[in-house]
Image (cartoon, grey):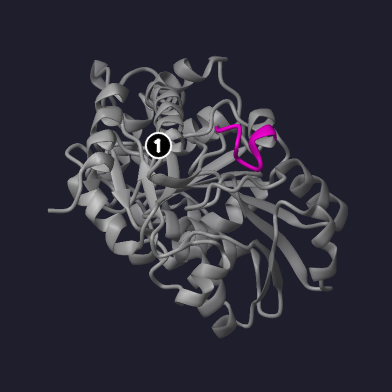
Amino acid sequence: MTSPYTRLETQLVHAGEPSPRIQGAVEMPIFQSSTFEYQGEARYDDVRYLRSNNTPSQVTLHEKLAILEGAESALVSASGMAAISTTLFALLGAGDHLLAHHCLYGGTHDLVTQEFPRHGLGASFIDATRPDTWAVHLTPRTRAIYVEAMTNPLLEVADLAAVVRFARSHGLISIIDNTFASPVNYRPVPAGFDLSLHSATKYLNGHSDIVAGAVAGRRDLVDRIRHQANLLGGALDPHAAFLLKRGLKTLALRVRFQNDSTLAVARFLEAHPRVRCVNYPGLASHPQHARARELFAGCGGVLSFELDGDARAADRFAQRLRIAAVAPSLGGVHTLITRPATTSHAGMAPGERRSLGISDALLRLSVGIEATEDLIEDFGQALEARPA
């Protein structure tokens, strides 16, 4: 989808907005209606209805997201997992096979390992940093390859250029969860991916007040996903659509600040004697640092780290923080800290988590938009404090 606006900051504010403005309103109003008058539509998916993802609030978001992603088409959904599950079930049928990044978000991992078998779908996990090991996992029914831009919570950076080449050479649909990068730091579709997925709950909205998802990419694939979404019913409601559109307008400002702030926090933590390790692609010590610099405009607002000590020591540290809230999720204006073993990856067996490098003591930090200096001072006092 094309736009008269060439720069991201202007696209975020103006792309997809109604023209002329509705009754002169600078901000598009909320269309709090599930039902619209019939206007002669011939196809089921074209009849305007909230569940059919074609109301004004939804269509405006579709157009804006398609332009931001450099994609032919886009679709919003009721959650990130709605976007992921609907996409995979739309593109894979009984007997089909998926190649999947070996360190997926916990909900996606559970979908692939627990729900796929119930529907006759197969999957193989691959080390997405080692392209030479992928071909052995191909089967005659492999249809797609699925990776994450940066993995949750270890911030591994896949060889994304190799994923695109591999998919094309083997006739696979290439799918990426771009939540951690956002279109500010990486645009997968212009880089060759067929589909880019988001938990729009995170950076796209950025205010921790809605749950939403998005998918953008090739029009023929998005049309298939939209039809599946209309049948499954995971539509985004009008008020959430309004809040997502509002949040998108400040995306570039927020993410660029978070890029810089998170790098500063990561450097502080890495230099502290009580911190055992820090996982952040912006650090020179990260194993995929060079790749991240080549791929991304910035490395985002999430890092993970381990202290010297066990899970109880990690919990005590988190409780001593004065600014960061101990809470799951990420990508918003508030700094949040969580222990993935108890939240995002709690559904995995402990042995599975350990095999992926996710220890019970690992902490994941999502840096918000508070003053960087205040955050560093807060982490400093929490690290220096001793248990009573």
Quadrant position of residue 97: bottom right
Q: Disc count in the image?
A: 1
- Asked whether, in this view, residue 30 is left or right of residue 286, the answer is left
Q: Amino acid at mark 1?
A: His
In the displayed structure, would residue 292 be above or below residue 355?
above
Residue under the point 27% across and 47% down: 210
Let me know if residue 284 is in the magenta part: yes
Q: Where does the image place residue 101, in percent across and percent down from the top left?
A: 64, 59
Q: Which residue is mark 1?
A: 272
Q: Where does the image place residue 382, in percent across and percent down from the top left?
A: 23, 41
Residue under the point 28% across and 52% down: 35
Q: Where does the image place residue 207, in percent across and percent down from the top left?
A: 27, 37
In the depicted view, which residue is nearer to us: 277 or 143?
277
- Asked whether, in this view, residue 247 is left or right of residue 119, the answer is left
Of all residues, the one furthest to the left in this rendering is 388
Q: Does residue 43 appear in the picture of this structure?
A: no
Let me know if residue 247 is in the magenta part: no
In the displayed structure, would residue 232 be above or below residue 249?
below
Q: Quadrant of the N terminus?
A: top right
Provide the secondary structure element on which disc 1 rests: loop
- Asked whether, in this view, residue 184 is left or right of residue 127, the answer is left
In the displayed structure, would residue 182 be above or below residue 79?
above
Q: Which residues are magenta?
A: 283-290
Q: Does residue 194 appear in the picture of this structure?
A: yes
In the depicted view, which residue is nearer to us: 122 or 324?
324
Q: Where does the image place residue 100, in percent across and percent down from the top left?
A: 65, 63
Quadrant position of residue 287: top right
In the depicted view, which residue is nearer to us: 19 or 247?
247
How crowded pointer 1 is (Cα within 10 Å; few <14, some 14-19, many 20+) is rated as: some
Residue under the point 42% across and 55% down: 52
Magenta-drawn stretch, dominant element (helix, strand or loop): loop
